[in-house]
Image (cartoon, rainbow, N blue to C red):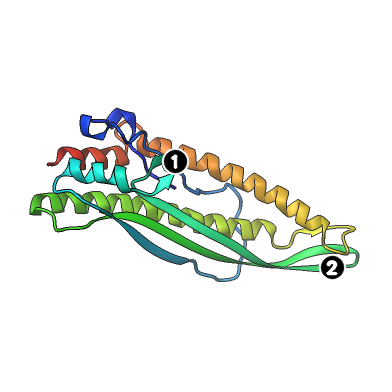
Amino acid sequence: MALHVPRALERPVLRAFGRLCYLTAALVALPLAAHAEWKPVEKVETYAISGQSGPELYRSIGENGPNVGVARAIAHTNFKLTWTRDYQPRAGACVLVSAKPKLIITYTLPSPSSPLPSVIQKNWEVFLAGVSAHEKVHGATIVDMARRIEAATVGLTVPDDPKCSKIRVEMTKRLSALSQAQRQASRDFDRVELGQGGNLQKLILALVNGG
């Protein structure tokens, strides 16, 4: 989940930044089922930027933001999802009895390294609040994705699998399909956010043009 600069928003001072693109996890269209209660761990990390104006701050983001793909990012949401699964052989079959996720979500956001002029500070706070809110949506959809994976896999039964080996192959297939659906949903979401008049476009333009 990373934010780059769209070409439609380029200004002379910003031309080195490339395009704006968030890579995010999003909702997977699967029915929810009952699941054990668990909570994700959420962390916030920052990287330092410099500047005393909107264009300077944004240029520094382009120079110092986290590397994601072929360009640097404004903000980044990363996650680590691991599972503790209980596979049990039953009458020659194998059943996934339970699956408990451990989900760690990390938000990486820019932070000015020195105090800003009062007007620029207000503009920056609006920009950062908007970007943070966007990242929080990504975080919420990641949590939702994990819950949907849990609901879609717990209770899975594979016949003629006393050693619980076939079921792992089937799990891989299912998770691959979920991952592909997730990536597509992510692209669709970002297309709206970055489209003409989209929220992220407005945030960037307001920062760059605000002084």
Give percent across and percent down for residue 155.
Answer: 73, 62
Q: Secondary structure at mark 2?
A: strand
105 sits to left or right of 110: right
Q: Secondary structure at mark 1?
A: helix
Using the image, tell me which numbered label, if any, was put on residue 89.
2
Q: Residue furthest bottom?
A: 37
Query: Picture quarter containing residue 203?
Result: top left
Q: Which residue is mark 1?
A: 189
Query: Picture quarter containing residue 93?
Result: bottom right
Query: Picture quarter containing residue 201?
Result: top left
Q: Gap in Å between the C-alphas at discs 1 and 2? A: 41 Å
Q: Residue furthest left?
A: 118
Residue found 55% across the figure and 54% down from its top? 145
Q: Is residue 89 above or below residue 76?
A: below
Q: Please give the count of numbered marks on the rendered protein.
A: 2
Q: Is residue 102 above or below residue 140?
A: below
Q: Nearer the viewer, residue 159 or 135?
A: 135
Please rate how many residues cluster around mark 2, counting C-alpha atoms within 10 Å: few if below 14, some from 14 to 19, many from 20.
some
Give percent across and percent down for residue 211.
Answer: 12, 41
Residue found 88% across the figure and 64% down from its top? 162
Residue found 32% across the figure and 29% down from its top? 7
38 sits to left or right of 160: left
Q: Is residue 74 above or below residue 151?
A: above
Give percent across and percent down for residue 63.
Answer: 30, 44
Give percent across and percent down for residue 176.
Answer: 66, 47
Using the image, tell me which numbered label, if any, was put on residue 101.
none
Q: Amino acid at mark 1?
A: Phe
